[in-house]
Amino acid sequence: MTPPSMMTMKTIGVRYFAALREHRGLDAEQVQTHAATAAELYAQLREQHGFPFDPEVLRVAVDDELRP
């Protein structure tokens, strides 16, 4: 696996729903990330914003398609 420092930084749009929206206090935001997967992105956001939810209880949509 490529170390994060060697990966390309990208800006992505993140939309929050339900409990994540309440916890974050935002509907959406632009995020700078090296994450290559939704799981990596959530780990980053969880660390930055203190999200209390385990990844297993979340539903993720990428380009409007729900992912397992």
Image: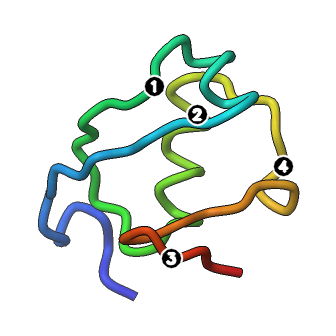
**Label 1 sits on residue:** 27
Residue extending furthest toward the bottom: 1
CA–CA distance in space, label 1 to label 3:
18 Å
Q: CA distance from mark 3 to mark 2?
A: 25 Å
Residue 52 x/y as whole percent: 80, 30
Number of marks: 4
C-alpha gap between disc 2 and disc 1: 19 Å
Looking at the image, is mark 3 or mark 2 nearer the viewer? 3
Could you give the CA–CA distance between mark 4 and mark 3, rounded to whole angstroms? 21 Å
Specify which label sits upstream in the sequence, 4 or 1: 1
Quarter of the rendering occupied by the N terminus: bottom left
From the image, tell me which residue sits under label 2: 47
Residue assigned mark 4: 54
Choose between 5 and 64: the one closer to the eye. 64
Circle 1: residue type? Asp
N-terminal of the pair, mark 3 or mark 2, is 2
Decide: marks 2, 4 in contact (CB < 8 A)? no
Q: Nearer the viewer, residue 21 or 43?
A: 21
Disc 2, SS: helix
Measured in 3D between alpha carbons, the distance from the residue under mark 2 to the one under mark 4, in whole angstroms, is 12 Å
Label 4 vs label 1, nearer the camera = 1
What residue type is disc 4 on?
Answer: Asp
Rendered image quadrant of residue 64: bottom left
The mark nearer the N terminus, 4 or 3, is 4
Q: Quadrant of the C terminus?
A: bottom right
* Amino acid type, residue under disc 2 in the picture: Glu
Q: Badge 1: few (under 14), some or many (20 or more) residues near its Cα, within 10 Å?
A: few
Q: Is tag 2's residue or tag 1's residue first in the polypeptide sequence?
A: 1
Direction from residue 51 to residue 28 in the image, left or right = left
Can you give x and y, in whole percent of width and height, for residue 56 in the image?
85, 62
Mark 1 residue element: loop
**Counting residues from the N terminus, which is met first, the one under dot 1 or under dot 3?**
1
